[in-house]
Amino acid sequence: MSPGLVFAAMLPEHLLLSGLVALLILEIVSDEPKGELAVSLVAVGLAGLAAAWIASQGRTLEPFPGQFVVTPVIAWAKAAVLLLAIPVLLISREDFERGPFYPLLLSSLYGILLIASSGSFLTLFLGIEIMSIPVYVLVLLAYRRPESAEAALKYLVLSGTASASLLMGASLLFGSTGSLSITAFAAALGSDAILARTAVVMVLAALFVKAAIVPFHGWAPDAYEASSIPVTAFMATLVKAGVLLAALRLFGEATVDPAHAALLALLPVVSIAWGNLAAMRQPNLRRMIAYSSIAHAGYLFLAFLGDGAGRFEAVLFYLAAYGVMNILAFAALPSDKDDVARDSLETLKGLFHRNPFAAIVIAIAMLSLAGIPPFPGFIGKFLIFKNVLAAGWTMVAVIGLIGSYLGIYFYLRVVQYMFMSPSAFHGPSPGRALAVGASVFCLALSLAIALAPAWFLARF
């Protein structure tokens, strides 16, 4: 492959890296650097445009054979991830006017892009670590709660355990197949060899920890609650997207054998039930979203029971719709100097009377996350369960749907607080220009997804 094509294939990564270098130079040359948000937005925006341009070319590029590959589907997935990063950056100004937040976020995004293009366990592991390590620091950055340090440590330890499990699985897979290619994992899914089966279970366990699937979910509620709003939004959407992109790369279009399919069915179904039931009892928004995220991870992993083509479109569409709505809810959340008060659901009581725009936007996000038509979340869940039913897992689909109905309760409770409860606070809720811009951006994306789902599905 010519040097020009090699450069073009990695253009989104190069642009992110250029933005990261620019941020570090700003930090070095100035005691109080300014313009970090603008540099980050430019780098992410250009990288997203580059990914969309690569996807529109309709070519498969492999600058490093066996290690790094770019297909149109991968490029569109990268474009979607980078597009979702823009509103996260916009809502970050209130918590991170300057400092290491922006370089850390760009570094984590670089890891997600590397995961999407990984061709072997070497690049996959490198991408996962580059994505994860900055997030441990991000949890601690806006240190507003005494439990932040404990949450970051819990996330670090359990995520490190997942990394060790992934490496053990890769080594067992190498011992079984003699290859570290991700295609070896797809082959191991149908193997009867005990070494290959153990390798698959170890890798699945690592993915389940990273995605917060029950019973490996213990870190998520604490980490989500103790982080600042932008970091929670980033973890709930983009970090989860990175884990599911890793799963998509590993599974490819392979059919899962019955033994592994049972594992893929059982734990996600338990996650759906437990996540939705636990979310009902949560008194604050971030912890509620954490348990909601556990349930949504269950929906996403159920898609792997189906065929390869349906798996890709269901997971990628769901990630896009789920990510937009999660960020939308966080972007519209009213500001408050007291982080605990801001996070409390009690604070949302009567919000419609203080800030109608914020209340309506959060309501749209909640209804979509609940899977109520005609919002994008309904289309995403429809595709997931359609895939599960097509694969013959009717009982799993029924149980998953029942679990999904449980989730409607706590989403509607938020709506009820905002519209039907008397306000416990007086005076208007202050607006934030950048946060309102992020809300409008997410609303536009959700409207596009809801009105033209076929166009999005055709990209995947």
Image (spheres, rainbow, N blue to C red):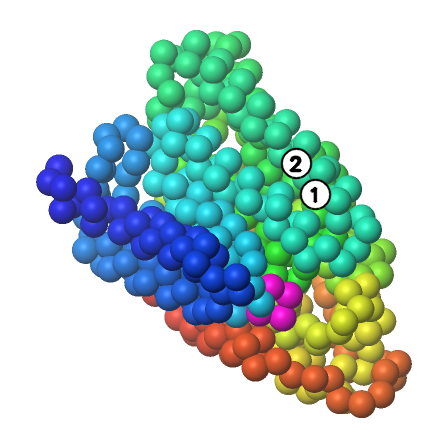
Q: Nearer the viewer, residue 408 or 433?
A: 433
Q: Badge 2 local density, few (<14 within 10 Å), some, or many (20+)? A: some
Q: Dividing the picture into quarters, in which one does residue 331 lie?
A: bottom right
Q: Badge 1 local density, few (<14 within 10 Å), some, or many (20+)? A: many
SS for tag 1? helix
Say which mark, if any, is on residue 135.
none
Identity of the residue drawn at 47% across and 62% down: 30
Q: Position of residue 238 (x, y in %)?
A: 52, 52
Which residue is outermost to the left?
2
Looking at the picture, which amino acid does disc 1 mark? Ala
Most frequent secondary structure within the magenta stretch:
loop
Q: Nearer the viewer, residue 264 or 382?
A: 264
Identity of the residue drawn at 62% across and 56% down: 231
Q: Position of residue 374 (x, y in %)?
A: 55, 72
Q: Eyeballing the image, is 62 above or below 14?
A: above
Looking at the picture, which amino acid does disc 2 mark? Leu
Say which mark, if any, is on residue 152.
1
Asked if the residue at tag 2 contacts the one at tag 1, i.e. Cβ–Cβ closer than 8 Å, the answer is: yes
Q: Which residue is mark 2?
A: 156
Identity of the residue drawn at 52% across and 10% down: 194
Q: Which residues are magenta?
A: 92-96
Q: Nearer the viewer, residue 382 or 117?
A: 117
